[in-house]
């Protein structure tokens, strides 16, 4: 995806609501998103958008969720079904922004707003429940195709046809894919320290990696 201009494929927002799954089970989640033409992006996230699980989702380090559209075809082939819009609960389904090319600390102008990439997305079982599949979560983690999260450096309006412009590539060049492989394999303290050394990394990941490094090296 390097060399191609990144752009928005879908802009989507949504408030938490009840999700029915399995046999009569329910869950309150913010994974349901609907396409919108225009929405304001504040430091806490998009207007008309929120998460239900405040411990594991949301916050200023995780204000924006992005997911590459290129993965959809792969998952649809594997699952044998068409996925819904913003199937992974992302606000921005993006083109030409693969996890292998997007790095922690990269800064992008999106419409009138400016965001900075902070961490890989840590998916949960809600993804499987949302799309009625029992293998997607496992495969997302195996491939590292999780999508990623960002903080807002400048508030502003984002439109569905807004351009995305890379303003600054972080000099450490630590990709989301490298972070995901390290995070989910959980065996390489040197790689963890490399990721942790990036100041722009989300606080939650810094704290989790600190605990893991101690566990692996003590």
Image: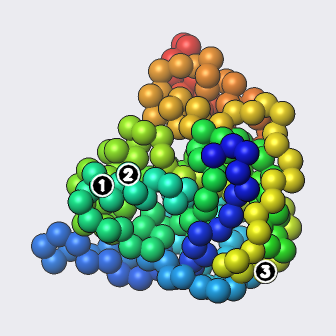
Around disc 2, counting alpha carbons within 10 Å, would you say few (fewer than 14), some (14 to 19), or many (20 or more)? Answer: few
Furthest-top residue in this view: 218
Residues tagged 2 and 1 counted as in contact (Cβ below 8 A): yes
Which residue appears at 39% of the width and 73% of the height?
A: 84
Which residue appears at 48% of the width and 46% of the height?
A: 145
Around disc 1, counting alpha carbons within 10 Å, would you say few (fewer than 14), some (14 to 19), or many (20 or more)? Answer: few
Residue 192 vs 67, above or below: the answer is above
**Image location of residue 160, percent across then percent down:** 66, 78
Residue 117 vs 109, above or below: the answer is above
The reply to whether residue 125 is in sight is no
Which residue appears at 54% of the width and 82% of the height?
A: 35
Q: Secondary structure at mark 1?
A: helix
**Image location of residue 119, percent across then percent down:** 63, 47
Q: Residue at label 2?
A: 74
The disc label shown at residue 77, or none: 1
Q: Residue at label 3?
A: 157
Between 93 and 124, the one lying in front of the other is 93
Q: Nearer the viewer, mark 2 or mark 3?
A: 2
Q: Is residue 165 left or right of residue 174?
A: right
Which residue appears at 56% of the width and 37% of the height?
A: 177
Residue 9 vs 133, above or below: the answer is below
Residues tagged 3 and 1 counted as in contact (Cβ below 8 A): no
The reply to whether residue 181 is in sight is yes
Q: Is residue 182 left or right of residue 163?
A: left
Q: Nearer the viewer, mark 3 or mark 1?
A: 1
């Amino acid at each position: 995806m390097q060399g191609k201009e990144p752009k928005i494929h879908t802009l989507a927002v949504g408030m938490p609501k009840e999700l029915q799954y399995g046999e009569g089970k329910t869950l309150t989640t913010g994974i349901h998103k609907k396409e919108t033409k225009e929405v304001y992006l504040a430091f806490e996230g998009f207007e008309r958008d929120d998460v239900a699980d405040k411990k594991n989702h949301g916050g200023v380090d995780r204000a924006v969720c992005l997911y590459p559209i290129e993965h959809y075809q792969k998952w649809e082939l594997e699952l044998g079904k068409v996925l819904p819009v913003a199937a992974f609960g992302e606000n921005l389904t993006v083109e030409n922004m693969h996890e292998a090319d997007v790095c922690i600390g990269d800064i992008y102008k999106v419409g009138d707003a400016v965001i900075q990439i902070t961490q890989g997305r840590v998916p949960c079982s809600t993804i499987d429940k949302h799309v009625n599949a029992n293998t997607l979560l496992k495969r997302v983690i195996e491939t590292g195709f999780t999508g990623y999260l960002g903080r807002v450096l400048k508030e502003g309006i984002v439109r569905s046809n807004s351009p995305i412009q890379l303003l600054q590539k972080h000099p450490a060049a630590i990709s989301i894919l490298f972070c995901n492989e390290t995070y989910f394999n959980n065996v390489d303290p040197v790689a963890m320290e490399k990721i942790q050394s990036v100041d722009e990394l989300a606080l939650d990941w810094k704290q989790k990696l600190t605990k893991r490094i101690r566990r692996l090296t003590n």
